[in-house]
Image (tube, coloured by chain):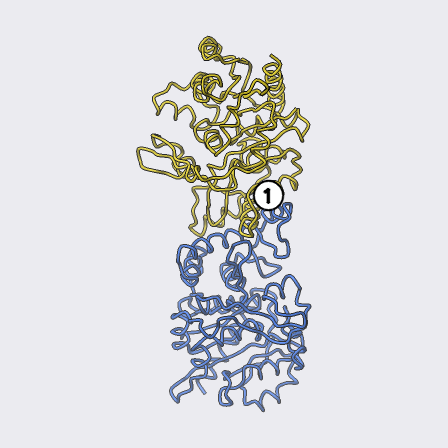
Chain colours: A blue, B yellow
Amino acid sequence: MKVVALAGGVGGAKMASGLYQILPPEDLTIIVNVGDDFEHLGLKICPDLDTVCYTLAEIAHPVTGWGREDESWNAFESLAELGGPVWFRLGDRDLGTHLERTHLLARGCRLSQVTEQFCRAWGVDSRVFPVSDDPIPTLVLTDEGQLSFQEYFVRRQCHPRVTGFKFEGIEKARPVPEVLQALEEAQVVVICPSNPWVSIDPILKVSGVRALLKAHHPTDHRAVLAISPIIAGEAVKGPAAKMYTEFGVKPSALAVAQHYGEQTKGGILTGFVFDTVDTNHLEAMQALRLKTLITDTVMKTPADRRRLAEEVIAFGFDLIAT
Amino acid sequence: MKVVALAGGVGGAKMASGLYQILPPEDLTIIVNVGDDFEHLGLKICPDLDTVCYTLAEIAHPVTGWGREDESWNAFESLAELGGPVWFRLGDRDLGTHLERTHLLARGCRLSQVTEQFCRAWGVDSRVFPVSDDPIPTLVLTDEGQLSFQEYFVRRQCHPRVTGFKFEGIEKARPVPEVLQALEEAQVVVICPSNPWVSIDPILKVSGVRALLKAHHPTDHRAVLAISPIIAGEAVKGPAAKMYTEFGVKPSALAVAQHYGEQTKGGILTGFVFDTVDTNHLEAMQALRLKTLITDTVMKTPADRRRLAEEVIAFGFDLIAT
């Protein structure tokens, strides 16, 4: 029973870690967004990959969800003292990751190889892959002009009004071969509660990925599920709700379901998971022909992640069986 | 009264800090070796510049003499965990320096500008300059082949037997203009107790530097003094004595004096400072026509540095006056 999770940052990492807790590690593959990746101070920084890997390895910061636990900030302090850029905070332990990654990439390693090597070192037994080894930097089009993702997200704290996105180079970006293979073999694909616009779309838009999710033969017993990152009209974390509003769409679980679409209607989903507080959307979901699971989707503790993962996987099996 | 110090690593930094304690900051310029500089993990690391600046700023590690006080090693630990290179230890605070320097150089700043900016940030009021903005990497020729300086010094702990040195690109390296100007204006030039082979020679060999030290007109009232880094046949720190031995020269204060030579005999020195334990060399020094100062040259405490600096400067004045 093979499961693939598509993940972005903190919400994605939490869902992925729930799945990692309950599945045999060899049955789980996690495909991670690279649109947030950027170069800073000459370092290649992959925020989503690191958040996912740190979380699975249980070395993530327990409060922020990103960065390392037990972190110190001495390099950053010393950099700040010298007038260096302070808009992107870099913890010392985290810096070690960026240094070694940058070093290995400069020596010709592919990002997916580096990620595998890091996972091995951190004791992460499931496979974690960037969707592509090619950079696909997200550009956020805003009323203040075009911003790199981290400029928008960190430096400007998501303040500018978004008008669109560009994923630079995505037409030419080659998917990591293991990503396509995992998607081909998956019986359950879980789209984690990550930002649909800037975490999941830049995965889906890589050549071959969406096509594999849409594949629908009579023999194709596969569930493609998404968990809504919007609960009661709000994103648990990050700018997803704000983005929907700026695009003229009321942020809601329904809007997320419509974003991905149901398979027989040209979308990719066979099922959708959303929070009990949004039960009022049930009828509209059914009109979309979506099979639904309504449950508590807020993951505050590792136990929450585990419980949600169990329910999601059981829901996926039900869909395949019927 | 203008003073210039030529300095390499820890010994040079201690002498420089003694001079910095006693002179008006605007009267002191420190010219630093860049032969040890190298790239590591994509970072531009300048060990001698950092040791000198950290020492003047009183943020150097009080025991090792290099690196920062109050240092943590979390980035390095995390790098090691990932299988990264561990032969060159990088402290967290120190990393901040390398990151910002690398960043500024990548943006087109010259190393001398970066150093000035850092000194300002660290509250160092005297001027500190790399001898050149061009890289002049020291290659150590050994019985095990040619090694980069840090490979020889750190990775191989100075074990290979040295047969010679190459300072790559030194013929074309342009001196920092302020370096030549400071040397022209200096009344006392102090060659710090640094390694003559790999700290001072790569300063002296930069175009124009040695010529300015040799300049000797009737009106040229200038003292050029060296302090022996060899005491009782041993280097206080580092491989200087081992190098002399490997070149077939008995390591001694006398060997250092001969290394630099007296001005009227084609060398650069007008005076030489060596330790009381080596008083037996006095006669040989006088045969070299060298004016000498014999005193305690071991600098264990900041007070030692200050006292030695006072004696050295007084000695320089005496030489000019006579």
Give whichever of B309, A279 is nearer the camera: B309
Q: Measuring 60% from the left and 76% from the top, which residue is drawn there?
A: A164
Q: Is residue A56 left or right of residue B316?
A: left
Sort mark 1 into few (<14), some (14-19) or many (20+) by Cα contacts within 10 Å. some
Q: In which quadrant will I find the N terminus of chain A?
A: bottom left
Q: Amino acid at mark 1?
A: Gln
Residue A129 x %, y %: 44, 66
Residue A272 x %, y %: 55, 81
Residue A72 x %, y %: 59, 49
Give whichever of A133, B287 is nearer the camera: B287
Residue that mark 1 sits on: B113
Q: Is residue B113 above or below residue B278?
A: below
Q: In which quadrant will I find the C terminus of chain A?
A: bottom left
Host chain of mark 1: B
Farthest-out residue, bottom: A287
**Quadrant of residue B176 in the image?**
top right
Give the SS element for disc 1.
Answer: helix
